Amino acid sequence: MRRPPRPGASRPSQPYAAVSELIDSALAPARAGLKGPAAIKRLADDMRQASQREGGITRDELELLGWTGAQLDAHAAEARERAQSLSVLTA
């Protein structure tokens, strides 16, 4: 049987979990809403990372990451060039 709290007794504070700022930086931003230079930069980075991990990436895999067909049609060529230039800098 639980006793009621004593008068004047404070309630325990709610538990607090500190969340590292690294978590925010680890989450990939939504890709479908990106346009113009922001889309090219992110798409190039996705391509560059995939080339280092798996040797490349397919259109289907890019769509699985959240890219739309229209974005890929509009930005893939420029993003590929940027990814290749970035790969040379990091190799």
Image (spheres, rainbow, N blue to C red):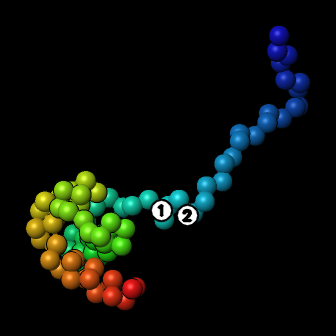
Figure quadrant of residue 38: bottom left
Q: Amino acid at mark 1?
A: Ala
Q: Secondary structure at mark 1?
A: helix
Circles 2, 1 touching at the beta carbon (< 8 Å)? yes
State the residue position of label 2.
Answer: 22
Please state which of residues 57 and 78 is positioned toward the viewer in this rendering: 57
Across and down, in percent, residue 90 comes to: 40, 85
State the residue position of label 1.
Answer: 26
Crowdedness near tag 1: few (<14), some (14–19) or many (≥20) residues, C-alpha within 10 Å = few
Figure quadrant of residue 31: bottom left
Q: How many marks?
A: 2
Please state which of residues 7 and 29 is positioned toward the viewer in this rendering: 29
For the N terminus, the quadrant is top right
Please state which of residues 21 and 67 is positioned toward the viewer in this rendering: 67
Residue positioned 16% across, 72% down in the render? 76
Q: Is residue 63 visible?
A: yes
For the C terminus, the quadrant is bottom left
Q: Secondary structure at mark 2?
A: helix
Across and down, in percent, residue 25 comes to: 48, 65
Q: Is residue 45 visible?
A: no
Q: Amino acid at mark 2?
A: Leu
Residue positioned 71% across, 42% down in the render? 15
Residue 10's place in the image compared with 65, above or below, is: above
Please state which of residues 33 and 83 is positioned toward the viewer in this rendering: 83
The residue sitting at the bottom extreme is 89
Residue positioned 83% across, 18% down in the render? 4
Residue 20's place in the image compared with 87, above or below, is: above
Residue positioned 75% across, 40% down in the render? 13
Across and down, in percent, residue 48 comes to: 32, 74
Across and down, in percent, residue 82 comes to: 25, 83
Crowdedness near tag 2: few (<14), some (14–19) or many (≥20) residues, C-alpha within 10 Å = few
